Amino acid sequence: VGPSQQSKSEEWAQGFVLNAKSGYTPGVVGFGLDAIAMLGLKLDSGGGRINTGLLPAGASGKAPDNFSRAGAAVKMRISKTELKVGELTPNLPVLTFSDIRLLPPTYQGASIVSQEIQGLTLQAGQFRSASLLNRSGHSKMSAKLGHDPQLSATTDRFNYAGADYRFNQDKTTAGVWYAQLKDIYNQRFYSLKHYEPVGDWVLGANFGVYDSKEDGSKRLGSIDNTAYFSLFSAKCQGSTFYLGYQAMHGDDAFPRVFNNVS
């Protein structure tokens, strides 16, 4: 395969997202339904300008006039514990929600969130497939190391569990998370956040560490990465000032689920 003959990527499109969430039926066990429907419309594209991530790239080398997808999740609630099964849009420390293109990605699987203990939020789940930002159907989940397209692999299992504990009058939060993209990587995440009012200001600090290793059959090979970040903030009325620092250590790039473009 030689170098690409395409000199640029340039497209224009319009997206629509309908997100409907029901309440719960009365009783000790409540049931509900969440539904999502999305439509992407091509406004301008061409055979020599595709692959922006906004629209699918068809077999003909041209983007279709439109693409869409829809799904639903059945949910059940007992006390302060909620279970969802179906089409989900998670936003987790170990699987960040991304709407950087026309339509957001969705995942198919199950999640559970429990807040039975004051200040403690427990979460866990498993996803079996995903929908890309510019695709109608479902596919296996993809992972990447850095920006090299050759360093990618797919799998049909993403498992996670996490705990966040708020204390000190809800000014401090500590978190511990674990994620496994089966046969590709596993990851641990540790976080600490604190906010402190000082006169007219609110000062904040946010620290986090990601520790990532290879998993199972090592479809991306051995992985050695530790990522650190810190973010300090100072807020006064409508203005907030930030100062941050991030560092990467290890022999490899940061591994992540990569479902941005096909």
Image: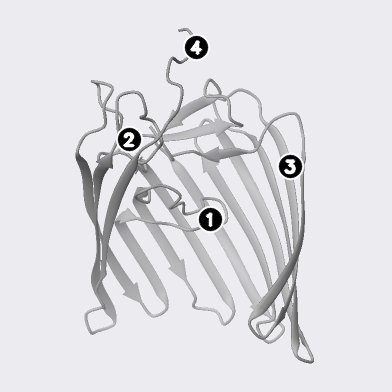
Picture quarter containing residue 117?
bottom right
Q: Label 4 to label 2, Cα distance in Å?
A: 27 Å
Picture quarter containing residue 172?
bottom right
x%, y% of residue 7? 46, 22
13 on left or right of 216:
left
Q: Amino acid at mark 3?
A: Thr
Q: Secondary structure at mark 3?
A: strand
- Do callouts 1 and 4 mark residues in contact (Cβ within 8 Å)? no
Mark 1 or 4, nearer chain start: 4
Q: Which residue is mark 2?
A: 139
Split into 4 quadrants, where in the image is the N terminus?
A: top left
Q: Amino acid at mark 2?
A: Ser
Farthest-out residue, top? 1
Q: Secondary structure at mark 2?
A: loop
Q: Secondary structure at mark 4?
A: loop
Quick check: 31 above or below 208?
below
Q: Residue at x 48, y 47 (%)?
A: 159
Mark 1 or 3, nearer chain start: 1
233 on left or right of 216:
right
Q: Residue at x 35, y 30 (%)?
A: 50
Mark 4 or 2, nearer chain start: 4
Indicate which disc residue 226 carries. 3
Farthest-out residue, bottom? 199
Q: Secondary structure at mark 1?
A: strand
